[in-house]
Amino acid sequence: QQIAFLTSLQRLLGEGSFVSTYKYCLLLALADLSIELGCDDDSTLTLSTKQIAEKFVQNYWRQSAPYLPDEAENVVLQQSTGNQAAIIQLVYTAHNKFEGSLSEARHNQKEWNRIVARVSEIVRVMPLWKLQTVGSEKLDFLYENLGSGSQITLKPGIAFCFRKHYGLVADMVKGAWSRYIRRFNSAALGDGTDLNEFLFGSERANLNDVKVILEDFQAGECFYCRRSLKDNKAHVDHFIPWSRYPVDLGHNFVLAHATCNGKKSDRLAAGEHLDAWVKYQARHSKSLAAEFNRCGILNDFNSSARIVNWAYTQTFENHGLTWLRADELRNLPLNWADSLAALKYSSS
């Protein structure tokens, strides 16, 4: 089933018809929601167009900003074959209204619901029921193509496949998305552009505020080595690396020495550090959320905990190595999940 899933996904990306980047965004949304809401079994997963639309707004938020904001032309990259994609225009307006802050937009419930509702309507009309078409052939391997409606149900095992092969799926979709945009924006992009970073890089927004919050809650100590931090050497680190799952959520941030952060790099932290993260969140998750909200920093403790569970489960099942200190790597212990199981969070 996993091979059939990846083969069909390759066909969609290679042979499907793309008049905008909506189908790429939809595939990423399904993959992300499978991580955050799915299970590692053969179960189905029902998703609403509202949930999908929220992912659309998040994915397009960074991309709706001018590509080179300091240039006179102020170009927003073209993401459709005709006029600019309608969702880009909607998100562009919201991006300007909230001065680029996705967190502030999400905390304005009335405005957030309005834009999500409008995006949801577009998703229902455009990509949702056209995604699985290749020429005249229907490849309904992800969900049943009902042709209309405000929800879909991923078929048995599909959420599992998205979770199992998330890195590969994300690379495939983002690569195709980047090539599509480069084709229609060659004049604006030039030859030496890091387009992938602009489209899919970390926002790294409000990190000074994050740093101040974490310094207080971590009592001025590096999360990993527990030695005292110096302000000029402290880095805000993604506990689950951005390369594993690209989302900036407050509870996933920890403060670390530059050297510890550099040595950890894109690896998962070892079981000892996972235990420390669990204890840290058990004590402070609610207080951290209050501070993040006060400073306009996007956060969702339940989502962060589910992402941690997914990342460590995948690493354990693949016998992957985790980072302990300096250049020391080790496998996760057999009981790695015990402490995480005791953490109170919503698992669905």
Image (spheres, grey):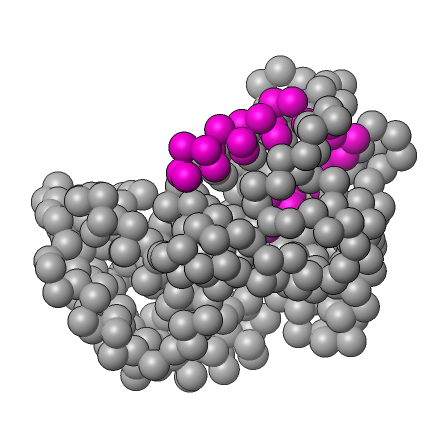
Whether residue 9 is in magenta: the answer is yes
Q: Residue 255's x, y, as percent?
A: 32, 62
Can the viewer see residue 243 in this picture?
Answer: no
Q: Is residue 192 above or below residue 346?
A: above
**Drawn side of residue 108 relative to residue 338, left or right:** right
* Magenta run includes residue 149: no
Task: Compare residues 203 and 73 and report the one nearer the observer.
Answer: 203
Residue 114 is at least partly visible in this image: yes
- Give the residue drawn at x 61%, y 23%: 14
Percent x, y of residue 172: 51, 31
Residue at the image point whose x is 21% and y is 51% from the top: 316
Magenta segment, prevailing SS (helix, strand or loop): helix
Count of residue discs: 0
Residue that extends furthest to the right in the rendered view of this protein:
83
The one of 293 and 299 positioned closer to us in this rendering: 299
The magenta stretch is 1-29
In the rendered image, the vertical position of residue 46 relative to residue 140, given as above or below: below
Q: Residue at x 49, y 71 (%)?
A: 300
For the point 44% across and 59% down, which residue is it? 43
**Side (left or right) of 182 relative to 82:** left
Residue 214 placement (x, y as % from top left): 37, 70
